[in-house]
Image: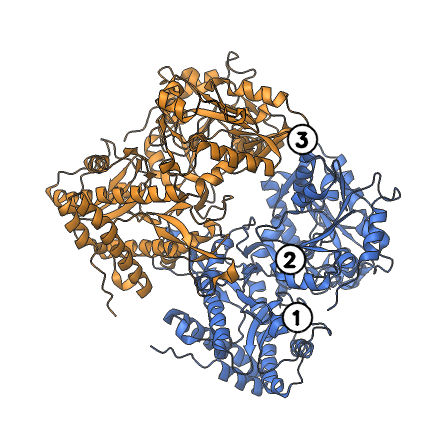
Chain colours: A orange, B blue
Amino acid sequence: MSPKITTELLKQLRQVMKNPKYVQEPVQAYIVPSGDAHQSEYIAPCDCRRAFISGFDGSAGTAIVTEQHAAMWTDGRYFLQAAHQMDNNWTLMKMGLKDTPTQEDWLVSVLPEGSKVGVDPFIIPADQWKRMSKVLRSAGHDLVPVKENLIDTIWTDCPQRPCKPLITLGLSYTGVSWRDKIVALRSKMAERKVMWFVVTALDEVAWLFNLRGSDVEYNPVFFAYAVIGMNTIRLFIDGDRVMDPPVREHLQLDSTLEPEFKIQVMPYGSILSELQAVGAGLSPKEKVWLSDKASYALTEAIPKAYRYLTPYTPICIAKAVKNAAETEGMRRAHIKDAVALCELFNWLEKEVPKGTVTEIIAADKAEEFRSQQKDFVELSFATISSTGPNGAIIHYKPVPETNRTLSVNEIYLLDSGAQYKDGTTDVTRTMHFGTPSAYEKECFTYVLKGHIAVSAAIFPNGTKGHLLDSFARSALWDCGLDYLHGTGHGVGSFLNVHEGPCGISYKTFADEPLEAGMIVSDEPGYYEDGSFGIRIENVVLVIPAETKYNFKNRGSLTFEPLTLVPIQTKMIDVNLLTEKECNWVNEYHQKCREVVGAELERQGRHEALRWLLRETEPLARVQ
Amino acid sequence: MSPKITTELLKQLRQVMKNPKYVQEPVQAYIVPSGDAHQSEYIAPCDCRRAFISGFDGSAGTAIVTEQHAAMWTDGRYFLQAAHQMDNNWTLMKMGLKDTPTQEDWLVSVLPEGSKVGVDPFIIPADQWKRMSKVLRSAGHDLVPVKENLIDTIWTDCPQRPCKPLITLGLSYTGVSWRDKIVALRSKMAERKVMWFVVTALDEVAWLFNLRGSDVEYNPVFFAYAVIGMNTIRLFIDGDRVMDPPVREHLQLDSTLEPEFKIQVMPYGSILSELQAVGAGLSPKEKVWLSDKASYALTEAIPKAYRYLTPYTPICIAKAVKNAAETEGMRRAHIKDAVALCELFNWLEKEVPKGTVTEIIAADKAEEFRSQQKDFVELSFATISSTGPNGAIIHYKPVPETNRTLSVNEIYLLDSGAQYKDGTTDVTRTMHFGTPSAYEKECFTYVLKGHIAVSAAIFPNGTKGHLLDSFARSALWDCGLDYLHGTGHGVGSFLNVHEGPCGISYKTFADEPLEAGMIVSDEPGYYEDGSFGIRIENVVLVIPAETKYNFKNRGSLTFEPLTLVPIQTKMIDVNLLTEKECNWVNEYHQKCREVVGAELERQGRHEALRWLLRETEPLARVQ
């Protein structure tokens, strides 16, 4: 992986930063955030502006370019990758380390007095605008909206915005009709006394209308906004795709509906003017509900006194709690996914010793096995297929320049998942196809202890996920080891593999309490730079727990693993496990045998079944 | 404890809320916060306005009175106490429970359109003003400052503000002179480019000048403010007490000092006008640093553009990291405190079976033994001496109406501490003087497991205390038990027993990372309403830990208990302990024997020494 040479691009950007065609007054700094106009984590190629200007294409990062400097903020997952992909024009700002300045503080330290800092108001979330603007203003600078995106002005071969066909999802997948979702949403709106709700996140639009798309790779979403009133529904979406008969029927566009369920379809690009019209027509006490992460541009369309901003929208919260149809779908998807991985690992075990399997071949093979499963749609993120030192690059994606061959001498880490029509998967397994060293086994076992500590944790109703994060680290901490990423994220139901409002992280973002029906990942790891990476990840469902005293009827929760793929026992130092941990592994493997074994049998995959049975032999603890 | 009858008082308050003598326009609601003008947790009698109007005298709570309602917000420690102390005019708002509205949301739900909500601007912290004001404004109401405190207008027999003599502390206690503290503070100010720093918290004034007082019970502080410029020092303090020769000498008021170390002494009441003068005289870029918890009145004295607000001041952070002199002082104080408690528990063991010892007698006896120790000043908080059901009232203080007699049939919980000139203590032990039930032992042992999990935790440098909170709960959670309070708070060095900026709590306040030298409490508990309370509390010092892999030189931390009082082994169900936990208890008791045993010997307290030796016999685990 050689870095992108950005000298010329930065020169051009610095020119347009002073060009009166684009800016009223020259801007001394220009911010290029990661996101798109919907604050998506995964974005379409036309929105990869930060990658275009810097070369760094990880999923999280913010670039800031000034006359003298170009700096990139990213988190621990991407320190190595960003350092590899960016040339010497760029300074890497390692977020989460004590001495790394915030973007605002850095700007204050490098800018000349009275500077203007530009940003695209459609790309920056309103809450971030507010924070930055405040710090900059108090230091005598100004954050200014630059209407035309300055990267777009120098990006001559920028791809078009995608506009792919839509998929409709019936009740057997969603459990609730879009009509009932609108009814529930309006009742939340009535509770908060708001008259309008603006849906800006792509997965929220998709979930609300029980539609899916493929405008963004890995995320089954489509470019759209929606504005829901107490009596109106407006869907802002481009192309003829809503005209497809199945979609027309699904949305009941041709039915004689009560007016409050009649969907008005409008062009995607008209959202700002329509919202401004809504904003202009409000009478006192008519509030408009927006996410505080909605773009600054849309937020500003509503006069300040009429805004009702929350960190999580009612859709985000409703979407996180999966109903019975969704939970059953997720279970089915995970069983199919496990079948594919049993096939893969069985195949790798035979092929790796021949020295012909590269990281890319292994990733492709994983996709091939997954694609054989029913209702497979696409992958849910770029497969992380990494061996040896590449495993320490937390969000590594193999490319020809970095592609290593799997061997019996190195640890192999596979973090992968898929979108099935009935659910989304995300699983990481760390394998050794030869004989792991004592140190590798030791580290793996601490990670496993952390994984179990979260998965088997019992906690009272109302507990927030971040309170469980240290459970995942305790065994590593005892030996002076740690990992620089969170422990878990929410997972969508045939939707984004990363979703809010819950998670398990040492970062105390304002997560919502865990509730039965929520689905999160449990994925502690350990990374030794230049040597290997270890991560053990299951997707787990929050379920009620049974306890001796039941928190005086407050009730308690625990997790049920949905992922059912063997954890390589060869990597475990059994003597480091407690009896309880040992039993957890054995019970987990017993469930893999029963559930996935039955499906392998049903699909006639006998060799993979034999592999599964061998890999799930009970651990025996030496007393 | 019978509730205070408040009907007449509320009637009077509602009258002055409409009286043009005090308010420009009638206020429809009046907020009575807990604090004083320094946002102190413990307050002088003249500042106990919330207790005066409601009867509830716990350390935390906010009252709001409207035309129709009177409501009190307090946290889990005080649910029972508040319910007992308040009459039917009051509604208890249980903070931390899911369905309890915030004060702002409640106000919005009960107030008529366009209401005014009044509050004393000297009592409400600026950050709270901002938050409330925003929510109220967005709902069409107004938060308004009411200059004259409305409670004071109806409080006919309000006591005078205290003005007691000062104590000077030499280098052997403080480790650093006030001059050097000023130098360090100015260097922090220069780093942040601020010209002025306003010291508003009483313990910060005391710490900065190496002075102590006794204006507030339990907290060795005195009413004062300070304003530190780059070249000036202004101390706002009343009375002749600064004129005492030792104080004059300590502050070098009569020496020929460099002008930047010359202290100008000014009247306490002149802070607002002086600060307004500072605010009026600022040139561009001259910032004034204040805590964001400073009062709204003082914060408003500085024009907004010139304010530099942080949640923790540089003094708060410097004060939290104890130097060698302070740490040694804390060690000495805790040994003396342990001597007093060994005497007490030995005495209780003999006296309780006679049926003559009440909660109040036990508390008084504890104070008597403590007062025999060198450099004893006063208690560090009101002793919680509680037996049986009283133990479940988390911050219980025995009064004649509730005073129970200790017996061999009930659990006894003693949470107590003292101020010694060399340090502050805070320790809780839960004892049974007869035979505890299996259930009591079970609960006690889970609490002990939680206590050990925190105390023995190893974690990387830079970890925030709130990440350790769940360690204290895990064993309880596993059985469906929990406690409704945080696990630990910072402890001052001959200063407030509760201090920031660190702590161990599920509430994710913006705590600063733990650092070697910080001192916190470790105090999980379990409370069975109507039956008993259990809490095990040590004060612990953050120290560097040694680990196998040392976090790649990031370094690691753990805790060293400063409290050295036996944990009653009779209450422990040894079979519920792991081997590691069992060893922890035995090593802890071994240290109590050695360190406290030597001091008991030195003080010739042979009977208490025999008690200590018996109580610290090693636990034997049945294999």
In the figure, A353 relative to A63: above or below? below
Tag 1 and tag 3 share a subunit: no
Read off the chain for label 2: B
B30 or B255: nearer the eye?
Answer: B30
Pinpoint residue B528: horizontal percent, then vertical percent.
56, 68
Residue denoted by label 3: A285
**Would residue A602 be seen by someone viewing this image from the given angle?**
yes
The disc labelled 1 sits on which kind of residue?
Answer: Thr
The disc labelled 3 sits on which kind of residue?
Answer: Lys
In the figure, A401 relative to B454: above or below? above
The residues tagged by marks 2 and 3 sit, at their Cα atoms, a distance apart of 58 Å
Q: Is residue A427 left or right of residue A20?
A: left
Judged from the image, the secondary structure of the residue bearing numbered disc 2 is loop
Judged from the image, the secondary structure of the residue bearing numbered disc 1 is loop
Which numbered dot is residue B383?
A: 1
Residue denoted by label 2: B177
Q: Residue at x 49, y 63 (%)?
A: B481
**Would residue A47 be seen by someone viewing this image from the given angle?**
no
A171 or B410: nearer the eye?
Answer: A171
In the figure, B491 relative to A45: above or below? below
Pinpoint residue B285: horizontal percent, then vertical percent.
66, 32
Quadrant of image for the N terminus of chain B = bottom right
Residue reaching furthest to the right: B21
In the figure, A353 relative to A294: above or below? below
Examine the image and state in which quarter residue B140 appears. Answer: top right
